[in-house]
Image (cartoon, rainbow, N blue to C red):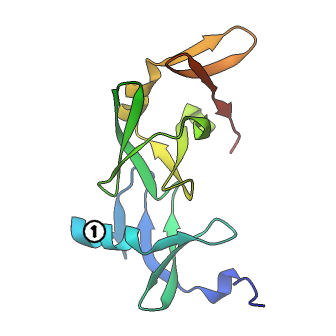
Amino acid sequence: MEQAKSAHDFPPCEIFIDKEGRWFYKGAEIVRRDLIQLFYSHMERDGQGRYILSWEGKPCMVEVEDTAFVVRRVDRKDGVFSLHLSDDSTEDLLPETLSVGPDNVPYCMVKGGRFPARFTRAAYYQIAGHIEVEEGRGFFLRIGEKKHPIAFTQG
């Protein structure tokens, strides 16, 4: 049986992703979208929640300020919320994963529930109009007749 790798088993990639989803290598912003998309396609999370980039069998750890994926825009059509993500993909919101973290920042899970994603301020405002509050019961995202409770988490 293979043992889980420890933090010392993965060297740093010298790549940093800030809370807005911007990628940096050794302090310089990476602006080539094709490289960023390539990195996203080779990223996983280990059992401790760290972001691991594996290229040609050589894994390294990516430093992430908050989440690697960022929700940049939200569209609603026919009761479905579409998320436009920082990897230039679009996917449907999994409403049961919507939560609010520290500083009232919304989050959800993306990529089949494998990664958390942070909402930008613009995306937050686009979904906020669909959030309802019930006295004593909390906040809900209404989709059709169904109300999805929104969890509040601490840092």
User: Which quarter of the image is occupied by the C terminus?
Assistant: top right
- Relative to 125, residue 27 above or below: below
Rendered-image quadrant of the N terminus: bottom right
Choose top left, top right, bottom left or bottom right for residue 50.
bottom right
Query: Which residue is labeled 1 in the image?
Result: 30
Rendered view: 150 above or below 50: above
Q: Is residue 131 left or right of residue 4?
A: left
Helix, strand, or loop for circle 1?
Answer: loop
Identify the residue shown where x is 70% and y is 8%. Answer: 135
Q: How many marks?
A: 1
Q: Is residue 73 left or right of residue 44?
A: left
Category of crowding for the residue at label 1, using alpha-carbon neighbours closer than 10 angstroms: few (below 14), some (14–19), many (at least 20): some
Dividing the picture into quadrants, the one containing residue 149 is top right
Which amino acid, by three-letter code, is at mark 1?
Answer: Ile
The answer to whether residue 95 is visible is yes
Residue 29 visible: no
Q: Position of residue 116 (x, y in %)?
A: 55, 52
Residue 5 at x, y percent in the picture: 69, 84
- Picture residue at 76% right of the left edge, 11% below the top: 136
